[in-house]
Amino acid sequence: MGKTIVITGGTGGIGYQAGLALAKADPQNVIVITGRSAESGKAAVEAMKKDSGNPNIHLALADLSMQSAVRSLAQDLTDRFQTLNPKPSTLTSAP
Ligand SMILES: NC(=O)c1ccc[n+]([C@@H]2O[C@H](COP(=O)([O-])OP(=O)(O)OC[C@H]3O[C@@H](n4cnc5c(N)ncnc54)[C@H](OP(=O)(O)O)[C@@H]3O)[C@@H](O)[C@H]2O)c1
């Protein structure tokens, strides 16, 4: 059974590559990538879907330099996804 994996800073750089690898590893994995830019975030989602063949790629937007945005992101993720696997926080690409 796939896992729901959140990668902060996953719309670019090493976070994107980590998300891509996890999306390829199991087509049932649900990958949520975060960043600040909606434009580059949407492009990253489409690229990850195409490059991995996994359609379960989602975007969450937040500027994590602000504590209030961290809390909002946590609420957004809780609202949108029924189960979150906590382990992938170790994969976080912290900007
Ligand atoms: N690349 C390397 O070889 C390397 C090696 C060692 C360590 N690191 C460290 O690993 C981290 C990531 O490096 P990278 O090269 O992958 O960076 P990157 O290409 O700049 O990617 C950063 C990611 O973080 C997001 N981001 C940046 N600032 C943010 C903020 N305030 N709130 C939320 N999201 C934010 C970006 O999306 P938006 O711009 O849309 O927000 C993007 O998704 C950095 O801390 C870097 O110092 C990198």
Image (cartoon, rainbow, N blue to C red):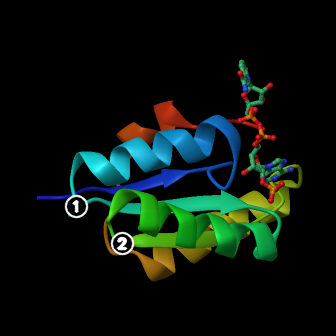
Q: Residue at x 70, y 63 (%)?
A: 71
Q: Give x and y (percent) for residue 89.
A: 49, 39
Q: Which mark is residue 81?
A: none
Q: Is residue 28 left or right of residue 4?
A: left
In the displayed structure, 27 sits above or below 24; it is: below
- Quadrant for ligand 1? top right
Q: Residue at x 79, y 75 (%)?
A: 39
Residue placed furthest toward the front? 51
The kind of residue tagged 2 is Asn
The kind of residue tagged 1 is Pro
Q: Which mark is residue 56?
A: 2
Disc 2 to disc 1: CB gap under 8 Å:
yes
Label whose residue precedes the other's in the sequence (2 or 1):
1
Q: Residue at x 62, y 51 (%)?
A: 10
State the CA–CA distance, disc 2 to disc 1.
Answer: 8 Å
Q: Give x and y (percent) for residue 1.
A: 11, 58
Specify whether residue 61 is in view.
no
Specify whether residue 21 is in view.
yes
Provide the secondary structure element on which disc 1 rests.
Answer: loop
Question: Looking at the image, which is closer to me, 19 or 78?
Answer: 19
In the displayed structure, 53 sits above or below 91; it is: below
The total of numbered circles placed on residues is 2
Q: Residue at x 49, y 81 (%)?
A: 79
Q: Give x and y (percent) for residue 40.
A: 76, 67
Q: Is mark 1 within 8 Å of ligand 1?
A: no
On-image quarter of the C terminus: top right
Residue placed furthest toward the left? 1
Which residue is label 1 attached to? 27
Q: Is residue 33 left or right of residue 87?
A: right
Question: Looking at the image, which is closer to me, 90 or 25?
Answer: 25
Give the image quarter of residue 29.
bottom left
- Bin the neighbour count of mark 2 within 10 Å (Cα to Cα): few under 14, some 14-19, many 20 and up: some
